[in-house]
């Protein structure tokens, strides 16, 4: 988890403008917060190793999930591609 936190800090520092505030917390689940969205990271440990899921949230709601990434590099690359993308909600129902 610490490696993911460090890599995210480096990536966000390089892809965001100086006037954009952001923070990465690692004192529980790793979370990267930006003004209009946050990325939470879920790690599943299995017999084949770790798998990561990136959870994109806006206004406190889950917007999308991406993953089962095998490496921290894959996770960070996905976040870098999502930082400047539009956050779009998909409405779905079961009825």
Image (cartoon, grey):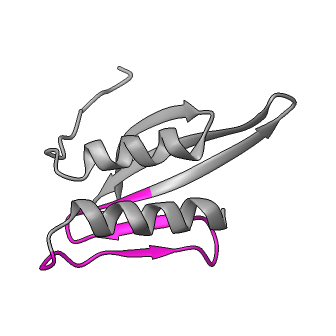
Where 94 sits versus 56, above or below?
Answer: above
The quarter holding residue 53 reads: top right
Residue 25 magenta-highlighted:
yes
Q: In front here: 75 or 59? A: 75
Q: In front here: 61 or 38? A: 38
- What residue lies at 39% left-to-right and 42% top-to-bottom? 77
Magenta residues span 18-39
Count of numbered circles on the image: 0
Picture coordinates of residue 43, whole percent (x, y): 66, 47
Q: In front here: 28 or 95? A: 28
Q: Is residue 24 left or right of residue 29?
A: left
Where 20 sits versus 74, above or below?
Answer: below
- What residue lies at 24% left-to-right and 53% top-to-bottom? 83
Picture coordinates of residue 52, whole percent (x, y): 60, 41
The quarter holding residue 28 reads: bottom right
In the picture, which quadrant includes the N terminus? Answer: bottom right
Picture coordinates of residue 7, whole percent (x, y): 50, 61
Q: Which residue ends up furthest to the top in the rendered image? A: 95
Residue 20 magenta-highlighted:
yes
- What residue lies at 49% left-to-right and 38% top-to-bottom? 74
Q: Is residue 4 left or right of residue 48?
A: left
Picture coordinates of residue 33, whole percent (x, y): 35, 69
Where 40 sits versus 19, above or below?
Answer: above
In the picture, which quadrant includes the C terminus? Answer: top left
Q: Which residue ends up furthest to the right in the rendered image? A: 47
């Amino acid at each position: 988890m610490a490696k993911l936190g460090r890599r995210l800090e480096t990536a966000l520092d390089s892809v965001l403008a100086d006037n954009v505030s952001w923070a990465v917390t690692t004192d529980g689940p790793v979370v990267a917060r930006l003004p209009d969205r946050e990325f939470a990271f879920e790690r599943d440990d299995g017999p084949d190793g770790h798998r990561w899921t990136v959870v994109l949230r806006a206004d406190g709601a889950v917007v999308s999930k991406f993953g089962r990434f095998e490496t921290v590099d894959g996770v960070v690359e996905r976040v870098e591609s999502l930082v400047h993308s539009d956050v779009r909600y998909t409405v779905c129902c079961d009825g």
